[in-house]
Amino acid sequence: MKSMAIVIRDDSYDKILTPLAFAYLTASEGTQVDMLFVNWAVKALTAEGAAALRIDGRHAAEEAKVREGVAKAGLPVEVYDIIKALKSTGCVNFYACSLAAAIFGVNEGNLIPEAEGIVGAAWFLNDKAAKAEHCQYF
Amino acid sequence: MSDMTITAVLDTSGKCCPMPMVETNRAIKGLAVGDVLHIIATDVGTRKDIPSWCERTGQTLLSMTEQDGVINYHVRKDR
């Protein structure tokens, strides 16, 4: 697989792990991965937002156990550290959806440097998702 | 097995997806064609991940053995 596009909507700690793990897996093989963060997930592209990610709802009480499992699996425990690890592969691009950024308080001032920028969904869907060999939505 | 010379060992014991594959990709990049990588894994997901990765990336899986929950793979770098 040469390219993959991923759209991430869910922002709870546990739910964001899978798309990040899939991106890490494919990027390690040299696949180009473009990730668009929409809705609440856009806040994961800020240092404060990434650090604030928690497990929601009925699994909330199990957060410590999940974080322990993530460490045992060999992944960085903090989402921002996972993002940095993905970036270090040289194959992953992170984009913040402009609508989500406007609604949920993300701007070029608080966007993490690992992100490529704030982009329109039309550009991402046409120039990245439609042209990718594979597209996933989380 | 007896005529196989292991060039490098990658121990992923205890780690789970995606790390065994991330580390395998990283390790193979550092080897020369013809080198043999010995991968030690405990993640049962690698039973399918590593053979399919070998086929996809053009490497040769020389052997795959499992004992007491530890899976040993010998992979020759072919490209």
Image (cartoon, grey):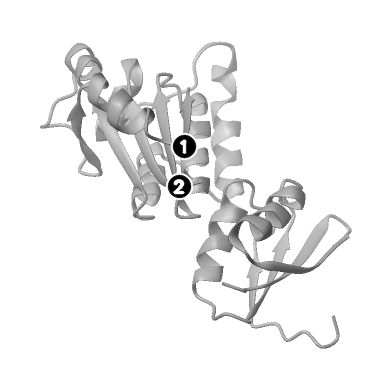
Residue B69 in percent (x, y) is at 84, 55
Residue A29: image x %, image y %?
Answer: 50, 55
Q: Which mark is residue B56?
A: none
Mark 2 touching mark 1, by CB under 8 A?
A: yes
Q: Position of residue A45 (x, y in %)?
A: 28, 32
Residue A34 locus on image (x, y percent)? 35, 37
**What chain does mark 2 sit on?**
A
Please rate how many residues cluster around mark 2, counting C-alpha atoms within 10 Å: few if below 14, some from 14 to 19, many from 20.
Answer: few
**Residue at the disc numbered 1:** A133
Q: Farthest residue in the right direction?
A: B67
| Residue in view at x 39 percent, y 55 percent | A89
Camera-side residue: B28 or B10?
A: B28
What residue sits right under mark 2 in the picture?
A2
* C-alpha separation, residue under disc 2 versus residue under disc 1: 7 Å
Secondary element under disc 1, as helix, strand or loop, is: loop
Q: What amino acid does circle 1 point to?
A: Glu
The quarter holding residue A70 reads top right
Q: The residue under label 2 is which amino acid type? A: Lys
Q: Secondary structure at mark 2?
A: loop
A127 horizontally vs A79: left or right: left
Instruction: Identify the subunit bearing mark 1.
Output: A
Q: Is A133 positioned to the left or the right of A113 in the image?
A: right
Q: Is residue A99 above or below residue B30?
A: above
Residue at 64 percent across and 83 percent down: it is: B7
Compare residues A94 and A31 and report the one nearer the observer.
A31
Q: How dense is the environment of label 1, judged by Cα within 10 Å: few (below 14), some, or many (20 and up)?
A: few
